[in-house]
Amino acid sequence: METILLLAHTETDGSLAKSAREALHAARTLNKAIAGSNLFVGLVGESVQAAADSIGACPATKYFGVTGVDFSQPRYASDAAAAEAICKAAQATITVAPATSRWARVLPGVAQRLGGRADTHVTGVAAVDGKISVNRWYYRQRMEGALTRTQRPWFISVDPGSQPACECGSGTAKVETVAVNLPDSCKRTTVVGIREPKADAQTIRPDAQLLFVTGAGWTKKQADGQMHLPEAEKLIRDFLKLTRASLGSSKSLVDQSGEGQAVLSFLSHMNQIGQTGSTPRHAKGLSTCCHGEEPHTVGWRFINERRAISLDPNCGWARGKADVLYVADAFAVMAKVNALLSTSSKT
Ligand SMILES: Cc1cc2nc3c(=O)[nH]c(=O)nc-3n(C[C@H](O)[C@H](O)[C@H](O)COP(=O)(O)OP(=O)(O)OC[C@H]3O[C@@H](n4cnc5c(N)ncnc54)[C@H](O)[C@@H]3O)c2cc1C
């Protein structure tokens, strides 16, 4: 009989992140598809009762918690010990967890400790006739594979954004405390602070509806023979401020800083989309001043509706990569779009 465990950690305010609810959706999908299976929840954090209660109406029949100040911060030694203890207490055969940075570095190690196997970057789960399969993408998202395993325990980390978040409501959850005695050697690492960009400088927004991509064209000489970098910066910043879109870029543009060329100050390699960049998930995408070559557009795999603005009617977007291509000057188009957006935001 399969025992399916959702393994999640709480956030600093004690809540559950959306990615945890997405993993719960995947765990519940398996639970529904496998007759007679158990669905349990395991939570790690300084205190977990509020998080457990927030999903208290879900069909899980048991809740396990590892709590205490030692488990408030991400740290390999304490997180691995907590996950191991919960998996043992629950006797989980399948553990489903969100692929947060905290779990991603811990779960393969926990699988090793328990003699199990781990699959990462899972984007889909299913079970037919009691046989579980998971989907993931290979070769920079070019091929999708489905695989099954007979080995148990099986650890499945689910990519955030690949599942709908479960909408089960709150209730009162009875959490069984699982004791973990951490030796001092497991407490040597402490988090002394977090360095992150200011909220308004954070341009990568995985939850945004729209991906806005900037290409190298923004920094090229325009029809008047001049570059218009300050104008480009302002147009892009204004658009992001008005729409809260997530900012992506082509490789050519983010590489320019390494070449000592003039660049857009708020872009880094973290923004790069494509074969050697990221493959984000957004409902819509708008590309500007970008040629739409295959190594770039392969990163658009999970963007459902695609539009592009390029001066070149023969660019890659025109060759089946975009649903709509506007052959136009992106400086002019974005200035008009921003004007319309700011008028509508005032009304
Ligand atoms: C192994 C390998 C891996 C790679 N991985 C990646 C990757 O992960 N991501 C990635 O992006 N690339 C990647 N590349 C590079 C990729 O092949 C392209 O070189 C790159 O995407 C081109 O960037 P771009 O379209 O911004 O620039 P360009 O090719 O210079 O295109 C600029 C475009 O802007 C247009 N333009 C200029 N001015 C305007 C204007 N005013 N209005 C509208 N349009 C305008 C031009 O017409 C042109 O089409 C990789 C390449 C290799 C070989």
Image: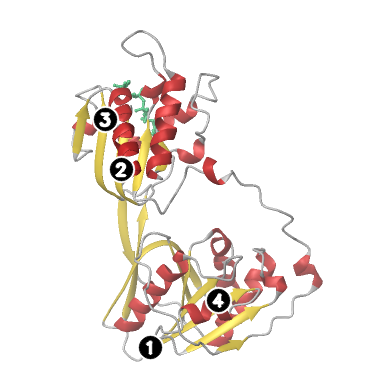
Task: Bin the neighbour count of mark 4 within 10 Å (Cα to Cα): few under 14, some 14-19, many 20 and up.
Answer: few
Nearer the camera: disc 4 or disc 1: 1
Q: Position of residue 35 (x, y in %)?
A: 31, 89
Residue at x-position 65% and y-position 78%: 67
Tell me if I can see residue 215 in this picture: yes
Looking at the image, do the residues carrying marks 2 and 3 touch, with CB atoms under 8 Å apart? no
Helix or strand or loop: what does disc 3 sit on? strand
Mark before the other along the chain sequence, 2 or 3:
2
Task: Bin the neighbour count of mark 2 within 10 Å (Cα to Cα): few under 14, some 14-19, many 20 and up.
Answer: many
Nearer the camera: disc 2 or disc 4: 2
335 shown above or below 180: above
Nearer the camera: disc 4 or disc 3: 3
Q: CA distance from mark 2 to mark 3?
A: 11 Å
Asked whether, in this view, residue 105 is left or right of residue 235, the answer is: right
Nearer the camera: disc 3 or disc 1: 3
Q: CA distance from mark 1 to mark 2?
A: 40 Å
User: Which residue type carries mark 1?
Assistant: Ser
Q: Which residue is mark 2?
A: 285
Mark before the other along the chain sequence, 4 or 3:
4
Q: How many marks?
A: 4
Q: Which residue is mark 1?
A: 37
Q: Quadrant of the C terminus?
A: top left
Mark before the other along the chain sequence, 1 or 2:
1
Whether label 3 lies within 8 Å of ligand 1 gets the answer: yes
User: Which residue type carries mark 4?
Assistant: Gly
Q: Which residue is mark 4?
A: 115
Mark before the other along the chain sequence, 2 or 4:
4
Q: CA distance from mark 4 to mark 3?
A: 52 Å
Task: Bin the neighbour count of mark 3 within 10 Å (Cα to Cα): few under 14, some 14-19, many 20 and up.
Answer: many
Mark before the other along the chain sequence, 4 or 1:
1
Q: Which residue is mark 3?
A: 309
Q: CA distance from mark 4 to mark 1?
A: 21 Å
